[in-house]
Image (cartoon, grey):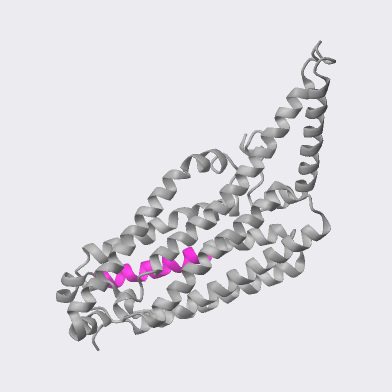
Amino acid sequence: MTSGLEEILRSNADANLPLLNTVKYAGLLSSTYLLLEIISTLEDEARLIWPSRWSIMKIIFLLNRYSPLIDSTIGLSMMFGTTNPRSCDIQFHVLMYAYTVGAFLSEAILIARTLALYEFKPWIICIMIAIALEVIVPGMIMSHHVFSQIQYPSRAVLEIVGCVPSIDDGQSWVLYMCVLISETVVIALTIYKMWHTSAEDDQRSLLTWTMYRDGSLYYVMLLILSIVNLCVMLLAPKAATSIIQMPLRVVHSTLCTRVLLNLRKVAARHTDMTMSLDSLAAGPRSRLTFAFNDVGEAATDMDRDLNREMDLGIDMEIELDSVGVGVDYDGRDPEAR
């Protein structure tokens, strides 16, 4: 039984070789974007994540953030430096497992955000468990099916095109469809919560607004990329079916990383503002109190507004702390000091 790469070269090598090269360049572009994203957010990670106590969510965050480096490195090694069929086999197995686990980790962050948004109510926990199973079970079945069906090309073919066996994983569109369905449920719950909260109280905390904003914006971006990926997998020539898979993996991971980083930024900003107000309240009273009475009243109004904002967000911060997002007044968790 011949491999997909061999069939492609035999059918129309002149047309398919440029498509295979495009798949390689897409992987290279994804790796470049991933490195730039990690570098650009490294300062926030060092300030907001590293000092915090170890927790499940911190581990998930770090794995989700850096696991794409494994995927990208293996992918580039396969496409640009592998000419041995046995090595191609081993690396592709590792890549498939790392890719699938990484997708699960990204979904775990979105699930944790939704649980915090709904304050861990029992019915939302049941929905999130169902979503997790809806992604995990098909992912395991799909991986087993791909490994049992895929054929690896000869050394002569690998020397020409590199190891790109992902063109034979046509059935993996099922996994991407399941991820798309789960994220659609998550954003629907987010929009419903946003509408329900605004109907009850127009004064929403900055933390809550950040969760709404990130959830909606990132979902739209992932939705567009996921639809493009599904269309390419189902409609494009076989040589190009995997061109969006690695970019989707990297974008999925980086956006989920920013979800937690942005929440930590807002939580740290709240604590810093509270400390500043406490310092002002504890300082000596000025002799120019009467001269600056209007300024004092304005400051009091600002203080009152901030306190109302903090009161509205305090419950959300408690829930966020349980999933590894909350911070203490010095920007760190109490146990980390």
Considering the image in quadrants, where does the C terminus appear?
top right
Q: In which quadrant of the rendered image does the N terminus lie?
A: bottom left
Within the magenta stretch, is there residue 91? Answer: yes
Residue 243 percent across, percent down from the top left: 35, 70
Residue at screen point 37% across, 59% down: 30
Q: Is residue 68 left or right of residue 110?
A: left
Q: Nearer the viewer, residue 233 or 162?
A: 233
Residue 122 is left or right of residue 157, and the answer is right
* Rendered view: 302 above or below 194: above
Give the residue displayed 26% in from the left and 66% down from the top.
79
Q: Residue furthest bottom?
A: 1
Q: Main secondary structure of the magenta part?
A: helix
Does the image show residue 158? yes
Q: How many marks?
A: 0
Q: Is residue 232 left or right of residue 326?
A: left
Q: Can you tell which quarter of the image residue 331 is in?
A: top right
Identity of the residue furthest to the right in this view: 290
- Residue 264 or 187: which is nearer the viewer? 187
Residue at 78% from the left image edge and 23% from the top image edge = 295
| Quarter-of-image position of residue 155 | bottom left
Which region shows up in magenta? 87-104
- Left or right of 296, for residue 334: left
Where's residue 132, x and y in %? 60, 71
Q: Nearer the viewer, residue 50 or 240?
A: 240
- 280 to 119, vertically: above or below: above
In the image, residue 286 lies at what x, y percent? 79, 13
- Is residue 293 one of those drawn in magenta? no
Residue 5 x %, y %? 24, 79
Q: Is residue 132 visible?
A: no
